[in-house]
Amino acid sequence: MNAPYPIRGRLAPSPTGFLHLGNAWAFLLAWLACRKDGGTLILRMEDIDPDRSRADYADAIIRDLRWLGLDWDEGPDVGGPCGPYVQSERLSLYAEALDRLASEGHTYPCYCTRKELRTLAGAPHVGDAGAAYPGTCRTLSPERRAELEAAGRRPCVRLRCPEAAYAFEDAVAGPRSATLEACGGDFALRRSDGVVAYQLAVVVDDGLMGVTQVVRGEDLLVSTPRQLALFDLLGFRRPAYMHLPLLCDPEGERLAKRHAGLTLASLRDAGVAPAAVVGYLGHKAGLLEAAVPVHPRDLLPAFAPARLRTLPARVRIEAGLADTLRT
Ligand code: GLU
Ligand code: ZN
């Protein structure tokens, strides 16, 4: 991911739970990708969803990332020129971007209820986009809108998606191309309760923070064409992408909150050393011959996106790993 301009990477955790081994995997690799290129690293707290985000999780995430040995140059705890680095403090920037898209005719209000969207016959499921939105409200007349408003319906705001295919070269996942239709159609930029959608917040932030490389889990690959469309419409330069294979349990299930024994906090409480976690993850990533304890910086010489390309799409951990790591 070499570029003729200064590299800026980011770690973008959502404080909706404690960091687990799967998050540590993604953040370690994102840290390596940025540091390998001599880049500047940003920590951005993505607490845009008020129902799921908690300040104590945000504090715990910072503690756990530091415990692992990761560092950053800009962030909520260290400041920097592109702050604030907490999404809930950036709402006016998202509102400005929405206004701009609206004034250029790129958005429209959608009054459909969840139930209506669910019952649309034959709606295909497309990744995290849910059922593809059929564009029902694209062409509502002003009279019909007024009626719906009068009936108390509160609209979400959707992007009127361009028809183009969005192509990009992923440093690990390879060349990709998709239309937004295939990614779920016109997507929401703001929910009916006023909460800004992840897709918009992440692009406004990556754009305004000058992020040049996005390294994150493969689960977000499906979001990338939508984000590219927003980068283009808002006039930001597109970043380069690296989507990582997901770390999974022995059954191939993606690591998540319910794997409670695999949070960094519980591993630490069980007496696991951070170097053991980093060495294990480095080994799983193909950067170390054996899972020996190391500091993240010890993985820098071996790090290369090409190595990650040889990994399976789902990297499985072994049963009883928490015990193995302790010894
Ligand atoms: N905050 C998002 C998450 O935790 C990641 C956003 C991104 O990397 O684009 O899933
Ligand atoms: Zn609608």
Image (cartoon, grey):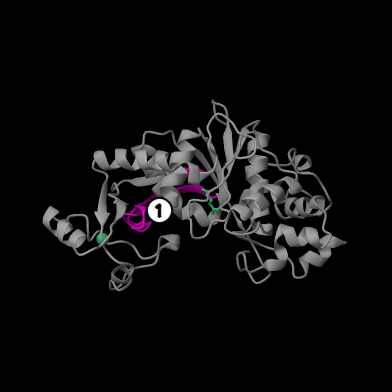
| Location of residue 188 (image quadrant) | bottom left
Q: Position of residue 182 (x, y in %)?
A: 36, 57
**Up/down of 75 relative to 183, above or below:** above
Q: Position of residue 201 (x, y in %)?
A: 44, 45
Q: Nearer the viewer, residue 286 or 327?
A: 327
Q: Amino acid at mark 1?
A: Val
Q: Which residues are magenta?
A: 169-195
Tell me the residue that label 1 is attached to: 195
Within the magenta stretch, is there residue 170?
yes
Q: Residue at x 54, y 56 (%)?
A: 53
Within the magenta stretch, is there residue 85?
no
Quarter that holds the C terminus: bottom right
Q: Nearer the viewer, residue 10 or 99?
A: 99
Q: Position of residue 75 (x, y in %)?
A: 60, 38
Is the residue at mark 1 in contact range of ligand 1, meaning its CB lies under 8 Å from it? no
Q: Residue at x 57, y 27 (%)?
A: 6
Q: Is residue 52 left or right of residue 108?
A: right
Instruction: Decide: few, some or many residues near mark 1? Use Cα within 10 Å; few <14, some 14-19, many ≥20.
Output: some
**Up/down of 78 relative to 222, above or below:** above
Q: Position of residue 125 (x, y in %)?
A: 39, 67
